[in-house]
């Protein structure tokens, strides 16, 4: 009863934290023990950008999914959405299914993945040690809304457990292998379901394209993506993707190839004088034509930010060398 009162208090405290597109979370069963929860990805014509926040630009506009592996009274929740309101819908659905014991995994430290952590005050939260360190370092700014602007995430629950090596977690009869990766950000943590050969990919892969958060390590990320492909997943479930593809069991490994091609081509053109004006179609034309990914409007802004980051970082630096 005390736990329920505490969770209710958190809900009241954060009731004023709003984003443009945080509506009714869609429940998307992948199989009998893996559920996707999807929100966002609104059509461009219905969006008022003047009211948008970091949660909208980085998650809700491109679409955001979280996932749960469940068996009986146990569930592993992979990421907790940008907001407590979205996370509450996930927890409520799982509790109605009989879940009483939760383990939470944060794919990395970026705010749209940890916004609902506080809802799991009664549960253990796991991340990489690097992600945990980043959240501790930035906790005060995250809670007062000054890191990326409002909405603040307050209170922020920092993961209690930080891992540095692959770690096995049991959820009833099922096993989840948590694998630290340096893709998208150095603190990444993907979840591998060996019995299904499914990959919960976090932000390591996206449709339409990846947000280049750390341009200094693109060559390493490129190699790590190649290693990820060797795991041979039969389905890839990113946090930001097309809900129709997620509902069909996820993407194929050509999404990995596309991401490698995109970051390599972007880096190799970072010294181009007209870099700032080069569109998405310049970098992944074959993948767009083949339907590996689709061109979602909100990713044009992400691509523009990627161009700016690359131009700034490599302005006075040599371009990276890419090995297979």
Image (cartoon, rainbow, N blue to C red):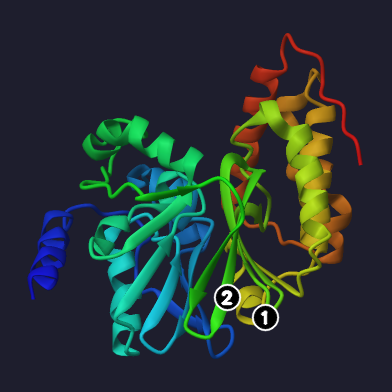
Q: In which quarter of the image is residue 138?
A: top left
| Secondary-structure class at tag 1 | loop
Residue bearing the label numbered 2: 175
Q: Distance between the residues labelled 1 and 2?
A: 7 Å
Q: Name the spot of residue 44 as percent of width and height, x first.
A: 52, 57
Q: Is residue 153 above or below residue 202?
A: above
Q: In this view, does 127 lie above or below 146?
A: below
Q: Name the spot of residue 152 as percent of width and height, x first.
A: 26, 42
Q: Which quadrant of the figure contains the C terminus?
A: top right
Report the residue at 82% width, 24% height from top. 320
Does residue 149 appear anywhere in the picture? no
Residue bearing the label numbered 1: 195
Tell me whether the residue at label 1 lies in contact with that at label 2, contact meaning CB atoms closer than 8 angstroms: yes
Report the residue at 81% width, 59% height from top. 229
Label drawn at residue 281: none
Report the residue at 48% width, 42% height from top. 129
The foreground one among 40 and 103 is 103
Along the polypeptide, which appears first: circle 1 or circle 2?
2
Looking at the image, residue 15 sits to the left or right of residue 180; the answer is left
Does residue 314 appear anywhere in the picture? yes
Q: Name the spot of residue 244 as percent of width and height, x first.
A: 62, 77
| Secondary-structure class at tag 2 | strand
């Amino acid at each position: 009863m005390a736990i329920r009162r505490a969770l209710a208090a958190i809900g009241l405290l954060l009731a004023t934290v709003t984003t443009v597109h945080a509506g009714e979370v869609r429940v998307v069963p992948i199989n009998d023990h893996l559920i996707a929860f999807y929100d966002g990805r609104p059509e461009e014509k219905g969006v008022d950008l003047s009211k948008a926040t970091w949660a909208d630009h980085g998650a809700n506009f491109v679409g955001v999914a979280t996932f749960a592996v469940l068996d009986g009274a146990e569930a592993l929740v992979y990421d907790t959405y940008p907001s407590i309101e979205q996370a509450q819908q996930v927890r409520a659905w799982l509790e109605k299914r009989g879940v009483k014991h939760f383990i939470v995994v944060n794919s990395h430290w970026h705010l749209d993945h940890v916004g609902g952590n506080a809802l799991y005050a009664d549960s253990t939260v796991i991340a990489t040690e690097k992600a945990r360190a980043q959240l501790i370092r930035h906790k005060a700014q995250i809670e007062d809304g000054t890191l990326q602007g409002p909405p603040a995430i307050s209170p922020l629950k920092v993961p209690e457990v930080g891992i540095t090596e692959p770690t096995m977690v049991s959820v009833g009869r099922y096993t989840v292998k948590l694998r630290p990766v340096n893709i998208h950000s150095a603190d990444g943590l993907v979840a591998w379901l060996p019995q299904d050969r499914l990959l919960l990919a976090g932000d390591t892969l996206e449709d339409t394209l990846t947000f280049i958060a750390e341009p200094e390590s693109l060559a390493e990320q490129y190699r790590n993506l190649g290693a990820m492909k060797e795991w041979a997943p039969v389905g890839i479930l990113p946090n930001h993707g097309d809900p129709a593809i997620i509902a069909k069991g996820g993407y194929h490994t050509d999404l990995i190839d596309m991401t490698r091609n995109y970051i390599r081509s972007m880096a190799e053109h970072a010294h181009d004088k007209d870099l700032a004006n080069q569109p998405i179609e310049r970098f992944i034309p074959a993948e767009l034509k083949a339907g590996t990914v689709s061109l979602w409007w909100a990713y044009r802004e992400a691509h523009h930010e990627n161009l700016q980051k690359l131009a700034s970082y490599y302005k006075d630096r040599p371009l990276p060398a890419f090995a297979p």
